Image: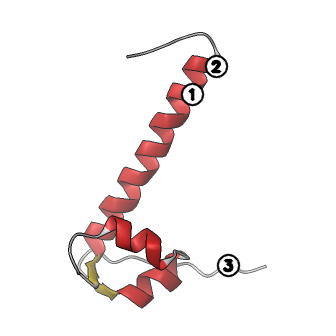
């Protein structure tokens, strides 16, 4: 099965619809992520946002793993 890849160019500008369809997101997800009523997204902003989200998930997983193994940090 071939999977479509949404390539994010750092200097490109994307509409709300392009981002939702390209990344498979809901309107609510984008509404939480954006500031004000911005409906265009700079590619670099998208990449930064996705990276921050991935880092947050990894950090939460790491905290969970430490707690599960008897370690508690912070």
CA gap, disc 1 and disc 2: 6 Å
Per the image, label 3 sits on a secondary structure element best described as loop
Residue ID at (36%, 51%): 52
- Residue 56 in picture, x, y percent from top left: 42, 44
Which dot marks residue 64?
1
- Residue 51 in picture, x, y percent from top left: 38, 54
Towards the viewer: 2 or 34: 34
Per the image, label 2 sits on a secondary structure element best described as helix
From the image, tell me which residue sits under label 3. Answer: 3
CA gap, disc 2 and disc 3: 35 Å
Q: Mark 1–mark 2 contact, CB under 8 Å?
A: yes
Q: Mark 1–mark 3 contact, CB under 8 Å?
A: no
Residue ID at (23%, 81%): 38
Please state, as top left, top right, bottom left or bottom right, where the N terminus lies in the image.
Answer: bottom right
For discs 1 and 3, the disc positioned in front in the rendered view: 1
Residue ID at (56%, 76%): 24
């Amino acid at each position: 099965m071939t999977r479509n890849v949404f390539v994010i160019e750092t200097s490109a500008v994307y509409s709300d619809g392009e981002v939702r369809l390209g990344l498979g997101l809901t309107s609510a997800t984008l509404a939480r992520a954006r500031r004000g009523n911005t409906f265009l997204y700079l590619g670099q902003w998208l990449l930064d946002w996705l990276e921050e989200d991935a880092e947050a998930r990894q950090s939460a997983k790491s905290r969970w793993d430490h707690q599960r193994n008897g370690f508690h940090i912070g």
